[in-house]
Amino acid sequence: MDASIQDDRMFEQAFRYSTIGLVIVDIDGTYLKVNEAYCQITNRQEESILSQIFIDHIHPLYRNEVADSFHTLLHEEKRSVNQEVMLDTVSESDSWVELSISLIRDDEAGRQHYLIQVQDLTIQRTISSKLKVSEAKLNQVIETVPSGLVMMDQTGIIIFANQLAEEILKVRLDGGVRDGVRSSYNAPEWKNRHLDGRPMTDEELPFSVVMRTRQPVFGIEHMIEGEGGEKTLISVNAAPLYDEFDQITGVLCSITDITAQKITEQQLLEANLLFKRKSEIDGLTGIPNRRSFDKTLQAEWDESERAGSLLTLIMLDLDSFKHFNDTYGHQKGDDCLRKVAAAIDRVVQDHKGFLARYGGEEFTVIKRGASLDESRYLAEEIKEVVYRLQIPHQTSVIDNVVTVSVGVAVKQNEHCKGRKMLFDWADQAMYEAKKNGRNQVLVYNK
């Protein structure tokens, strides 16, 4: 087969399977050729596009700019023009694209055409994060695609790689040859791995999947590691290349460097997790807050219902704490709450329970699977650990140190109709403990 015919076919495949819109129009702007990606961007069928005028599909606000670009390329020595415009689509939503327009001159035939690449920017604008695209040589279709483009033969040998592909892969591939050796899709120097670091087998790589299924694949994400240990995260689209006998002659891969995107996603995830954690942590004591308590009680109640297990709720309140603040000041009061919370938390953690600050000087404990006696024992431990802190409280009505009154309720049969009832039981027991003299544990018994 003549090499030029083979090259033409490869460029035709590159045009067809490009993941961005590609358009060729004549010198007066009439469509001559479009690819499927452009049809999807404009939400139009190819048959309805051809023979129309390209500029008519540009939003009226931007038509003059595009017309000026055509004029500039035709009459000046510029090779290309890039601009962001809005399309005049059949849908109601705005459709932003980046146009990269270049003038193609066929000196032998004496004809001129415009080659236009159309990159959909709608999603990027929606998330206010424009992804950078690389400018390549615009005198060939293969070099106008703003992504790494790699062509491989049916054995996986790389027969072409554009400049951006070389940058992403961090190697110099001259016609598929690196340091005198032809590179392949599974070259060991790239150390292909999944994003989680697991080795990626040859069978999982885009080339192998396409060759095995004879179908295009999209968005296969994996990691490559260069000779210097630098890791690059990439997303790969790949499609088969056919000859006139419908036999696969190779695979075309479009490669996008998603390293920065993934880093941003991870940072956003970590920020969200940190925000979520802070939103559920009491700022003064560092233990879970009321919001976290409500969420945990719901989850523990549901699990208790599902498993038929016991569920304990303990409410406790620092005795005469208003007098403590009035006597020692709110700064000392805050210090007291921190010490009490830390001491109780150690006890609760030993029992694999959950402690939260319910509000003010009130705390609550959730413990699943504990019997009535075990729950009473835990409550007594809590009372004693607070007393052993020996925090002075000269204006207490019960003792000269800080003490707590504790109420205990256990869901152990069908009498407890819901988590609110369980809460009310524990709350009632706590106030009965205060009423009966404070610094004691009282178990609700129904």
Image (tube, rainbow, N blue to C red):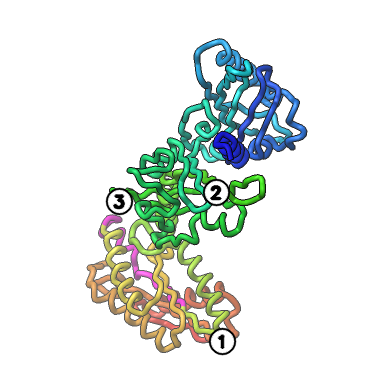
Q: Amino acid at mark 1?
A: Asn
- Residue holding disc 3: 229
Q: Amino acid at mark 3?
A: Gly
The Cα–Cα distance between marks 1 and 2, rounded to whole angstroms, is 69 Å
Question: What kind of element bears circle 1?
Answer: loop
Residue 125 placement (x, y as % from top left) = 55, 36
Whether the magenta-drawn stretch holds residue 328 is answered as yes
Q: Which residues are magenta?
A: 313-331
Please tell me which residue lies in front, 104 or 378.
104
The image's mark for residue 444 is: none
- Residue holding disc 2: 250
Whether the magenta-drawn stretch holds residue 58 is answered as no
Give the crowd class for mark 2: few <14, some 14-19, many >=20 residues within 10 Å: many
Q: Amino acid at mark 2?
A: Gly
The C terminus, quarter of image: bottom right
- Residue holding disc 1: 413
Give the crowd class for mark 1: few <14, some 14-19, many >=20 residues within 10 Å: few
